[in-house]
Image: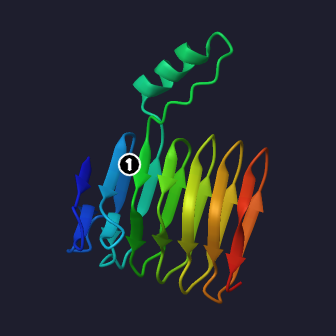
Amino acid sequence: ATISSPGEGKVYAIRDLSGSLKTIQNTGHIIAKGSSEDVRQAIALANNTSGVTITQSLSKANSDARKKKEKDGKKDTTVYTQIVGDIVTGSGNDRLAASAGQIKGDSYFNAGDDTLALSGDAAYFGTVNFGTGKGTMTMTDKSTFTGTLDAVGEMVNLTLSGKAKYLGTVRNG
């Protein structure tokens, strides 16, 4: 799903004002586009108080397509799944996990004990604001993070393994 604004507005690809949405599984594209003056939120779940799990992975069809393209030893650079725009969660314990594709935008976890987990060849570009509560960031396999980890003065555990690359800075930690 893609939604865009010509400027000075608010754009939401997924927005839950009731606070009842608890799970999002993305195997495609969630995109909120607009001008630099716009509020661009790909996922807006600030009213959730019980916790949210957002996962991003390859669909079976895209996994098969990637295997077919890479069969001859060539790297497949197709972006099969992505989230573009900010991600905002509420006061519960939230989890954002990506095993493939890209996340481009800033994440605001707000309150709660929150987790960002990158694995596979997932790539994150932006700032992660952990808010109040314990923060956990894990990176495995060939995942990459390019941006800023903002601990907001709280404790954040960052763990890297495999060939994961952290290409960023840490603020308020």
Q: How is the image coloured?
A: rainbow
Q: Which residue is mark 1?
A: 25
Q: Secondary structure at mark 1?
A: strand
Q: Is residue 158 above or below residue 67?
A: below
Q: Is residue 156 left or right of residue 88?
A: right
Q: Residue at x 71, y 84 (%)?
A: 173
Q: Quadrant of residue 137?
A: bottom right
Give 146 or 21, whichever is nearer the viewer: 146
Q: Quadrant of residue 29?
A: top left
Residue 141 seen in the figure: yes
Query: Horizontal placement of 104 versus 32: left or right?
Result: right
5 or 164, nearer to the observer: 5
Residue 120 percent across, percent down from the top left: 63, 41
Q: Residue at x 36, y 79 (%)?
A: 49
Q: Residues within 10 Å of mark 1 (few under 14, many from 20)?
A: few
What percent of the width, then of the height, locates residue 100?
Answer: 54, 41
